[in-house]
Image (cartoon, helix red, strand yellow):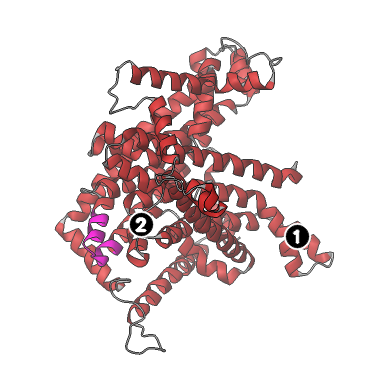
């Protein structure tokens, strides 16, 4: 922006800074509201068919429809737990929880095991020589190719997705941990060793913190990838999950509900990335 | 270290012996990097005939769960001779590259526009910040609804998905152009057009290239996933068909074919980067892969 402003090609400068925080946020996100209004207007006026593009209001309505449980209420008098279970038994909640469980389990395994392998590869040269070529060969492979295999191995349930996400997300984490740990300055390691730190202590107090920024960036890539793999595998073969819901709602022609679930997945992916970014800034605040 | 000395050796032309050590060094490295891959293949081959010691009657794995690598190689050779492989690889790569090409042109053009104009920036900034981290593959059924089941919907989704990395990289690059360079060029009388083509485009090229290197594997992933969901010819489609017929050598052959295609595409891009950015210090060390 600075470059454009300096060359004088811009019409006007940034919105005046004296606005309040809410007004600034409103001004910033106004384009999204405009898009939403255009969507609603186009669908309402009949400019595009309601079948091809259900109006935003009907999408929101059907989202609440998916939130509401389909069974009749057991009544709160029958105990709080059954009532709570009933209350949270809407389609989008149960399927969403299934998807999130797969995502968290797969990503958790990928982060923990991937980090360990990456750091060990950087730390022990024989392991590096053994594993590095394998990582280099498998890293560029589109991981979605593994969807049919995990289904062959583990069936239609949770575990085929968890293992898929685990395999797919492990390599970016491994590679970033490896690069981060290897990029550690030798002088720092030597200084720590000459000051009497043991090898393990050097690993934990010099090499690991040094690898952290790159590792966290790698985990962010893995997070985005895990959402892609989750939705893709659920769209292709599954019996539950948000991707599965998108698939069957689309097949059934319930397009407003399909749009609702699609936007839910998009919102979840966005929220996860933003949340992770905030966490990353907090963890890395010692750097500045 | 060895590499540095060898390049220095060739630079000053130390003669036959250094040439020989250079080739020996290259051969040693190649052997070292091929060895683990061969090891994996051998272990895989052995595992398919291994019998678990606790229960001698039952094989450790079945040919269905993990076919022998020789069977798979046979299958791939069969695909090559029947012409299926060429058709499938060609179709998948055509979709991926077509989408990628449109996405890169659109991404670069829009990115420069966003970086240069405050109003365009204001309009697209929230859209990009919301759209970039979104799992866009979830929009596939919507694209199927709009564009049908054939090439159009696949390529449209690839464009939609691959534009974002190019766009963000271009914006970051164009905004990061050194302002003293811009000032100097303007002071020397460069017009807006010259400024764009002679300063901003070359200066932002390395970062844009990084964005392209992220977008290309994404295009390939989306091409394969869309083929898997919609079926039909293509690497993903033939693989999912094999999976439906419980034809596990076909599935594994598909994985190997996709892995090789992905490897070639990504490595080709890295080589292209080295060639195009030979003037830039970043050329030696591609930031991705």
Res. B277 visible in picture: no
Query: Residue sitting at 61 percent across and 41 percent down?
Result: A277
Dot 2: element: helix
Please tell me whether residue A92 is drawn above or below residue A17 in the rendered image: below
Where is mark 1, residue-wise? Answer: A205
Seen from the viewer's position, the closer of residues A106 and A114 is A106
The quadrant holding residue B246 is bottom left
Q: Chain of mark 1?
A: A
Please tell me whether residue A198 is drawn above or below residue A37 in the rendered image: below
The quadrant holding residue B83 is bottom left
Seen from the viewer's position, the closer of residues B254 and B132 is B132
Res. B15 visible in picture: yes
**1 and 2 marks in contact (CB < 8 Å):** no
Residue B142 percent location from the top left of the image: 33, 35
With B168 as the anchor, is B265 left or right in this view? Answer: left
Magenta-drawn stretch contains B251? yes
Q: Give how far apart the Cα atoms at labels 1 and 2 are.
A: 39 Å
With A226 as the anchor, is B223 left or right in this view? Answer: left
Query: Residue sitting at 46 percent across and 53 percent down?
Result: A98
Residue B163 percent location from the top left of the image: 42, 33
The span shown in magenta is B238-252
Q: Quadrant of the N terminus of chain A?
A: top right
Residue A54 percent location from the top left of the image: 34, 27
Where is mark 2, residue-wise? Answer: A147
Q: Chain of mark 2?
A: A
Magenta-drawn stretch contains B175? no
Seen from the viewer's position, the closer of residues A191 and A211 is A211
Q: Quadrant of the C terminus of chain A?
A: top right
Q: Main secondary structure of the magenta part?
A: helix
* Residue farthest along the front direction in this orientation: A77
Query: Residue sitting at 38 percent across and 52 percent down?
Result: A240
Seen from the viewer's position, the closer of residues A165 and A98 is A98
């Amino acid at each position: 922006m600075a470059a454009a402003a300096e060359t004088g090609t811009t019409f006007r400068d940034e919105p005046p800074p004296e606005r309040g925080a809410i007004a600034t946020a409103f001004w910033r996100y106004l384009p999204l509201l405009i898009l939403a209004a255009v969507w609603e207007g186009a669908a309402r006026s009949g400019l595009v068919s309601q079948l091809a593009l259900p109006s935003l209001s009907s999408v929101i309505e059907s989202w609440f429809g998916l939130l509401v449980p389909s069974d009749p209420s057991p009544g709160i008098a029958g105990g709080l737990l059954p009532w709570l279970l009933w209350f949270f038994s809407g389609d989008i909640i149960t399927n969403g929880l299934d998807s999130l469980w797969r995502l968290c389990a797969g990503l958790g395994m990928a982060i923990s095991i991937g980090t360990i392998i990456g750091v060990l590869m950087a730390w022990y040269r024989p392991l590096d020589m053994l594993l590095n070529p394998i990582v280099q060969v498998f890293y560029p492979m589109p991981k979605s190719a593994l969807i049919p295999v995990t289904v062959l191995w583990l069936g239609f349930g949770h575990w085929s997705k968890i293992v898929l996400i685990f395999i797919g997300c492990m390599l970016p984490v491994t590679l970033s941990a490896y690069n981060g740990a290897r990029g550690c300055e030798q002088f720092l390691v030597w200084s720590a060793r000459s000051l009497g730190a043991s090898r393990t202590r050097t690993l934990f107090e010099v090499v690991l913190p040094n690898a952290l920024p790159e590792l966290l960036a790698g985990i962010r890539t893995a997070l985005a990838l895990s959402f892609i793999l989750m939705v893709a595998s659920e769209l292709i073969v599954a019996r539950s999950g948000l991707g599965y819901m998108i698939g069957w709602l689309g097949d059934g022609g319930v397009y407003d509900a399909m749009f609702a679930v699609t936007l839910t997945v998009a919102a979840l992916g966005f929220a996860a990335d933003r949340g992770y970014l905030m966490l990353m800034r907090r963890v890395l605040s010692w750097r500045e | 270290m060895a590499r540095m000395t060898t390049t220095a050796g060739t630079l000053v032309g130390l003669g036959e012996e250094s040439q020989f050590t250079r080739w020996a060094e290259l051969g040693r490295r190649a052997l070292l990097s091929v060895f683990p891959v061969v090891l994996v293949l051998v272990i895989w081959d052995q595992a398919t005939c291994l019998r678990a010691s606790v229960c001698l009657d039952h094989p450790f794995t079945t040919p269905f769960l993990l076919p022998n690598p020789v069977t798979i190689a046979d299958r791939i050779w069969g695909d090559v001779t029947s012409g299926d492989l060429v058709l499938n690889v060609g179709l998948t790569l055509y979709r991926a590259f077509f989408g990628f090409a449109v996405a890169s042109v659109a991404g670069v053009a829009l990115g420069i526009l966003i970086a240069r104009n405050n109003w365009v920036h204001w309009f697209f900034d929230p859209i990009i910040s919301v759209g970039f981290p979104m799992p866009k593959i979830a929009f596939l059924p919507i694209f199927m609804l709009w564009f049908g089941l054939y090439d159009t919907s696949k390529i449209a989704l690839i464009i939609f998905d691959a534009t974002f990395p190019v766009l963000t990289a271009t914006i970051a690059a164009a905004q990061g152009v050194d302002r003293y360079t811009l000032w100097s060029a303007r002071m020397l009388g460069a017009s807006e057009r010259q400024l764009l083509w002679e300063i901003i485009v070359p200066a932002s090229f390395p970062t844009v290239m990084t964005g392209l290197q992220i977008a290309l594997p994404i295009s390939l992933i989306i091409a394969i996933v869309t083929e898997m969901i919609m079926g039909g010819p293509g690497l993903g489609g033939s693989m999912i068909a094999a999976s439906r017929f419980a034809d596990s050598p076909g599935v594994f052959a598909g994985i190997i074919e996709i892995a090789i295609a992905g490897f070639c595409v990504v490595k080709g891009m890295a080589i292209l980067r080295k060639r195009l950015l030979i003037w830039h210090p970043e050329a030696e060390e591609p930031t991705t892969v």
